[in-house]
Amino acid sequence: MNLTLKIWRQKNASDKGKLVDYLINDVSPDMSFLEMLDVLNDKLITDGDEPVAFDHDCREGICGMCSLYINGEAHGPDRGVTTCQLHMRKFTDGDTIYIEPFRAKAFPVIKDLVVDRSAFDRIQHAGGFISVNTSGNTQDANSIPISKHAADEAMDAATCIGCGACVASCKNSSAMLFVGAKVSQYALLPQGQVEAADRVLNMVKQMDEEGFGNCTNTGACEIECPKGISLENIARMNTEYLKASLKG
Amino acid sequence: MGGFFKSSIGRKFAMALSAFFLMFFLLQHFAINFTSVFSGETFNEVSHFMGTNPLIQFVLQPILIFGVIYHFVMGIILELQNRNARQISYAKNNGGANSTWMSRNMIWTGLAILAFMGLHFYDFWFPEINTKFIEGDWSGLHDGEFRYYHELQEKFLSPVRVGLYVLAFVFLALHLLHGFNSAFQSVGANNKYTRGLKLFGKLYAILIPLGFVVIALYHHFNHNH
Ligand code: HEM
Ligand code: SF4
Ligand code: FES
């Protein structure tokens, strides 16, 4: 199929940037979206032009590196997939496709479609962990009884890959789905209890400092999240935060 | 606890608390107005009680005023902050693919309600304050009879005013269709036990504004006969 791509090009962080049109022919419906961009880049390089910079790593939906706002949706029109798992068969011959970087003040553009998501790393460093003794006497996790329900919910929260689609989709650029998932995955488990109050207070504080917006419960994040992280995690974070604030 | 209300989650929480208060107020306001449909006398008595009871006038009314002001001032502040969190907007954004129109336009439906409240205060609240606090008349009487029901009927004579009221309640319904459940989510109530609440929220959001519309139309058409 033949497509018109409108791609955001921006030389560096301080460049103003603009959408540039590219025509691409003979795209196979079996290609992934990123393979389609690889083909475009091959052509640009052959022609002596600057290739389009975009993020990617595993290309199998597990690392959270790929991004892109495709035709007005994070990770494109498909549900429950990352951009690397999106296939060209979701588009039709003759389509015009807008390809933009994830937009948020807290995710500044580095180049073209590549944005800096290290704000998420800083939130994780603020409390998204448990402290364990690794001296060799570490208790086997399986010796701690955990209900099936709690284990399932914690596992669901832990599938968040930190891609930032939630922020990109949110009209408020709120990071609460990501932070909600990271708080929940520990709040649901006995191992997470000791540091629970500090964790949620510190992570939310960092989140606010990074300049993300405020959740107004539109639910866009949940729909666009490639891992189906549920809004219940934000509700859980809110109660955890209230509990922690009342304590301290 | 100090930093709580400065944090994003704390503000969400406070926003939801003010909204709960407003939704509760709306319910009792509706209940009182509804009496006017079947008994002018009952409406008069309840209105007089509400208008002269010291607990309501000097404790609950100031709380209500604070709640309303807090809600829309905070609503506007949060909206501005949220806009600021994305400085370059998308060239193409398909908001309808992942969220409802109501959830994306809370500020506009909210501002429409605010505009309506201006009219509503001009109609009922300012005259009431004038009679009671400036003229010092707490009797609730006009020509020896309770004045409330009569004043109500007078107001709803004008088709323009009735039209504006109906329109305002459409905006209120839109605001609440998102707002009701949003408020529960904000205070952390979203789990398998709260599913039934979603339906209740939709019913509240539609039926209460609809009820107000029915009352306004009833008085408009009933008085002409
Ligand atoms: C009696 C009138 C009103 C009622 C019953 C009401 C109700 C609600 C409810 C239930 C929420 C959700 C709270 C939450 O998510 O935490 C909300 C949010 C909001 N309201 Fe109101 N509201 C009223 C008037 C207003 C007015 C006058 C404004 C003026 C600007 C306004 C603006 C907002 C905004 C901006 C939000 C936040 C957006 C969101 O949470 O999605 N509201 N309101
Ligand atoms: S919550 Fe979903 S959309 Fe947000 S970072 Fe995690 S995986 Fe990505
Ligand atoms: S490249 Fe790893 S998730 Fe897409």
Image (cartoon, coloured by chain):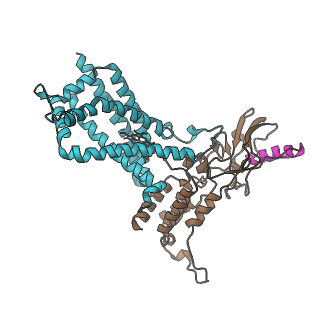
Image quadrant assignment for residue B170: top left
Instruction: From the top left corner, tell me how far across and down residue B187 is, in percent.
Output: 41, 54
- Residue A150 is situated, as x and y percent measured from the top left of the image, at 48, 64
Most distant residue in the left direction: B144
Residue at 29% x, 26% y: name it.
B216
Q: Give the image location of residue A170, x and y in percent.
A: 56, 46
Q: Which residue does the image show at 39% across and 35% down from the upper left? A: B114
| Residue B193 place in picture, x, y as percent | 40, 54
Asked if residue A161 shows in the view, the reply is no
Q: Nearer the viewer, residue B80 or A149?
A: B80
Ligand 1 position by quadrant: top left
**Magenta-drawn stretch contains A34:** yes
Q: In which quarter of the image is residue B136?
A: top left
Q: For the magenta stretch, what is the residue range?
A: A31-52
Spot the residue most to the top: B225
**Does the magenta run of residues contain A168?**
no
Chain identifier, colour brown: A
Tell me which residue sits at (33%, 19%) in the image.
B159
Q: Quadrant of the N terminus of chain B?
A: bottom left
In the image, residue B96 sits, relative to residue A85, either above or below, namely above
Chain B: drawing colour: cyan
- Lateral position of residue A186 relative to residue B195, left or right: right
